Every structure is written in C-alpha cells, then in structure tokens.
Amino acid sequence: MSTAMRDFLYGGMYLAACRFANIERFIERISVEIDLDAAADAATAAATFRDLANALPPSEPIQDDEAALRKLVADDLRAVAAARVPDADTPVRDRIDSAAGSIRSMLVDVGLDLADADLHVVDEFPPPFDQFGWAAFAPDREDEERYGIPTGVYFRRSGLRPLYSEALFAHEIIHTVPGRVDPEIQAMGLEEGIAEVLGTCFAATSAVPPRALRNVLTYGRHGVERPKLWSLYRDHTRQAFLLYLEFGIEGLVELTHRGRAKIHEAEAAVFAGTYRGLDLPRDNWNDVTTWLLGSFCNGFVPSHVFTPLEVVLIDHVDEQRSLVEVCRRANVPDSVGVPVLKRLGSESALFVRDGEHIGYSNVRHYLRMSETAGQPAIRYLPPRAEAPQR
C-alpha cells in the first residue's frame, strides 16, 4: 500500500499549530489545488505544500475574506510542510499494526481485559453500519449475534490517517470491553468520554506524540460549524475527566469492566454532581494524560474564532496603534479594514477602541501565548464558499 499526499497533509497538520477552526473546510481548500490521492514521499509532499503556500497569497491588498483566507491557508500549509512526522513514509495500515501492540500492552498493564480486539481494515463496513460515515467502529457481541459481524475494531480504508488512526484505534479498543458485558445497551454517552481518556489520552501516548494527540482532540472536538456529534464527544470527555480526576485510571478501568448500565449510572451521577460517591477504586494518575485532558477540557479557549479578514486584521492590533496603521500593517485598504476594526472593538473582547486608535488590547498577549503553547488561541473559520480563484 503506497502513501498518498493526503497522508502527509494530515500527518503534518496533527503536528503543526494550524489556525483553521474547521478541518474539513481546510482540507477541501487544499484538495482544489493538489491531488491528495496521488502517491508521494515525504520530501515531495513537503515541497508541494511549500510551493502552494508561496502561490496562494494575493499579490494585491487584501480586500475580502477570500483573499485573507488564501493568506491564512498559506501560513498553515507552511507549518504543515515544516512538520516532521515520525515514520512519515510508512503506510497508515502499517502504522496502526505497529502501534497496536504497545497500545494493548499499556491497557493490559493497568488491568483492562482486552479479548475481542482484533483489527479489521475494510473497504466498506458491513450492513447495517455501512450507512454511517464513521472512520472506525467496534461491533460487540450483540452485533455478532444479530448481524454476523465478528467482534473487534474495524477501520474504513478510505478513512485511514497517520497519527489520527493510531489514536482512534486506542479509543475504539476501549469499547470492546463494556461491549462484552451488556452489548444490548447503546455505547454512546459517557462511554465515549471514557474511551477518549483511557484510549486517546492514555494508551495512545505509547505510539503518538502528545502534541499530535492534543491536535487530534482540538481539531476534531473544538471545531466550529462541524456535526454536533463531535461536540458531544467533547462534552462526554469532560465528564470522564471529572471521573479521572477523582478516581484515576484504576477507577475508569473498573467502571469499564462493569459494563454499559453501570457507565450510564455513573453518567447520571456526574450530571447530578454526586459522582464522588461512586463505589470505584482510586489510583493511578498519569502525568501526560492529565496534561492532555487539562489542556483540552479546561485550558483551551474555543471561542476566539473569526472570519479570515478579521483574523488578518486582529493579528496587527496593538495598543495605541491607529486603526489606519493596523490596516496598513495588515495590507488591507483603510476603507475595508477600518469599519471591521470598529465593529470588532465592541464585539470581540480582544481589544477596546478609543476613537480612531486602539486603547487597550489583549491581542499581543494571546499571540505570545499561542506561540509558547504551540496551539493557536485566535483561529479563522474558512467559509463555505466555492474554491478560491487566483
């Protein structure tokens, strides 16, 4: 199986501090310019991304969101091209096979009973699950009895992604455990949050750099104008984080072994604020897991999302600068940028306008904070418009 240009784009994104707030729209913009299905190696892909990044920015002053978008997409592409993905030329299926052993070992070492956890990569999911657009799923014994689907972890071949798929395998393998206890109960809800904690934020650290895992969570769960499902995953991860802080890895492993009915009871206790009274052991808090969950659930500010033109202007806001100077530094005509800045001054909570100047501003603070953390605090939302024309 060869490695496609798409794999290098995703691999670089998960290690780069990209500023897009909707991953699908970013990929769609790139796919207009590059054949992402073409076979490539790491050097060729990086050169292709750099060439496109150099060609995208407009040569004229930035008049609208489309021109601003091209500049911001180019910045993200440069970051992707510069990222160094471990084993970048290794096909994704081989990456998952390589990671699976260490992921399983890490979970078995903390007492999780992994039995029905074989890996299957298929072109299409077996019915009735072929109607869903999932990248992976873990059918349980109820599915095996009702539909004849062997238990395990299934990946759709077209959905394989470097780094992401290794993390997703760690997530899905958690579902195989409660699925043996009471498979007739639906797996959604807190179980998804537990799978994110035990799988993505704990076991996957044996195979995927923590920075990439943080981006997997941020791009996937803090995205804007994406399907509501991913916001639910974020919310249930926050619930599971509360249980992790109280009971540690050992408590979550025990709850997973008790099955889905008990997980539902725990979810109700979290919702009611009575979860500290759950009869679970308390032990084993992992430093990297705690950092990932704290950063994703509590530390990240998902609300500073603006249009591309607004972001280009915001990047040049500083205390005591005139609105005209901000526009000129941003290469935006005064007639276009000044009205936008005046509106943002009363809406954004990032700065206060004092007449024709910037009075107070937190923009520099957020930009420095982003650089230090390697994670953008101010992001742009690519519009749903048609592909850009240069």
Image (cartoon, grey):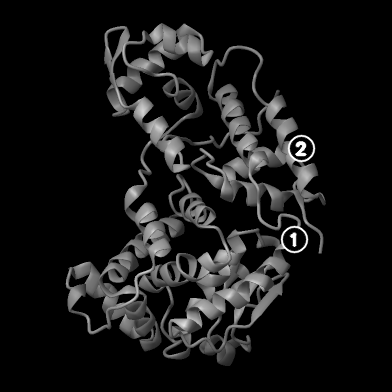
Percent x, y of residue 322:
36, 8
Residues under labels 2 and 1: Cα distance? Answer: 19 Å
Report the amino acid beneath label 2: Thr
Against 295, is 238 above or below? below
* Left or right of 46, for residue 199: left
**Residue at point 34%, 84% (across, down):** 261
Residue 147: quarter of image: bottom right
* Left or right of 15, for residue 368: left
Percent x, y of residue 388:
66, 29
- Where is mark 2, residue-wise? 48
Residue 69: quarter of image: top right
| Mark 2, secondary structure of its residue | helix
| Mark 1, secondary structure of its residue | loop
Mark 2 / mark 1, whichever is N-terminal:
2
- Where is mark 1, residue-wise? 90
Structural crowding at the residue carrying mark 1, measured as other residues with C-alpha within 10 Å and reported as few (<14), some (14–19) or many (≥20) = some
Q: Is residue 239 visible?
A: yes
- Say which mark, if any, is on residue 53: none
* Left or right of 87, for residue 20: left
* Left or right of 39, for residue 297: left
Structural crowding at the residue carrying mark 2, measured as other residues with C-alpha within 10 Å and reported as few (<14), some (14–19) or many (≥20) = some
Q: Is residue 138 visible?
A: no
**Residue at point 43%, 49% (across, down):** 222
Determine whether label 2 and label 1 are within 8 Å by CB: no
**Residue at point 55%, 89% (across, down):** 115
Residue 29: quarter of image: top right
Report the amino acid beneath label 1: Thr
Against 329, is 93 above or below? below
Quadrant where the N terminus lies? bottom right
